[in-house]
Image (cartoon, rainbow, N blue to C red):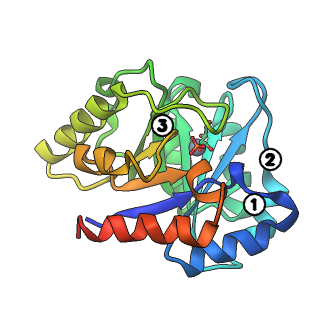
Amino acid sequence: MDRILAPSILAADFNVLGEQIKVCADKGAKYLHFDVMDGMFVPNISFGLPVLASIQGKEDLVMDVHLMIEDPIRYVDKFCEAGADIVNVHYEACGNVQTVLDKIHGCGKKAGITIKPGTSAEVLIPYLGQAELFLVMSVEPGLGGQAFIPGALDKIRRLRALLEERGLDADVEVDGGVYHRNVRDVLEAGANVIVSGSSVFRGNIAENVSAFVEIFKDYE
Ligand code: DX5
Ligand code: ZN
């Protein structure tokens, strides 16, 4: 199973966004995590379609779009057209989860289901064979730079076990409060896609990405 770093540009300097994304790609990040907030599902507003359209395709990175928006089916087509490779929707924000997954797949893209810290892994059971990725939030969505909620580790373990019982090897992604000092805990719990905002973009980006990639080598 590949261990993948997904830098979250929520923590980037938007005045030099392209340069910072290039450094991430050059140093070994494979995904780029794109946090969309609508001011409704979460109490914040970030960025959206024109930003995705302008950065997609510039580097060899998988565009991992995390839709923190109400009723995300309304925007699946548009984010796919703008360059999403993976569309993550919140379980809590969907009317009918299966319909949203079908819509994403109908656009030819990978689907992810995200759960908030208060949502149990068990709700994902009906969809384990229906999505390519499951995203466990380890902070309340809406803001970067928060502290990792330790209960996420058990949830990651449970989710990985549920997948393995069924012979499924979907990606398990973790998002929020992951730093070099605690990334081994989430890898050992069974996550393989690591979102990181603050611990990539605060300080020296090249060194930060390289340090994650070095840690991942211990798990190859
Ligand atoms: C939070 C976002 C995260 C955030 C992570 O709502 O989904 O992707 O950017 O930031 P850090 O790594 O700073 O916790
Ligand atoms: Zn995110």
- Residue sitting at 60 percent across and 30 percent down? 141
Instruction: State how far apart marks 3 and 1 are (Cα).
Output: 20 Å
Question: Where is mark 2, residue-wise?
Answer: 47
**Quadrant of the drawing holding the C terminus:** bottom left
Which secondary structure, mark 2? loop
Q: Please tell me which of labels 3 and 1 falls first in the chain.
A: 1
Q: Which disc number belongs to residue 52?
A: 1
Is residue 70 visible in this depiction of the protein? yes
Q: Is mark 3 within 8 Å of ligand 2?
A: yes
- Residue sitting at 75 percent across and 69 percent down? 55
Instruction: State how far apart marks 3 and 2 are (Cα).
Output: 19 Å
Q: Amino acid at mark 2?
A: Phe
Work out whether residue 170 or residue 81 is closer to the camera in this orientation and state it: 170
Q: Please tell me which of labels 1 and 2 falls first in the chain.
A: 2
**Quadrant of the drawing holding the N terminus:** bottom left
Q: Residues within 10 Å of mark 2 (few under 14, many from 20)?
A: few
Work out whether residue 168 or residue 181 is closer to the camera in this orientation and state it: 181
Work out whether residue 71 or residue 196 is closer to the camera in this orientation and state it: 196
Q: Please tell me which of labels 3 and 2 falls first in the chain.
A: 2
Q: Amino acid at mark 1?
A: Leu
Q: Which disc number belongs to residue 114?
A: 3
Q: Where does residue 181 sit, x and y in percent of width and height?
A: 40, 48
Above-or-below relation of 149 to 184: above
- Do tag 3 and tag 2 residues touch (Cβ < 8 Å)? no
Q: Where does residue 105 sit, x and y in percent of width and height?
A: 50, 55
Q: Which picture quadrant has residue 126?
A: top left
Above-or-below relation of 99 to 66: above
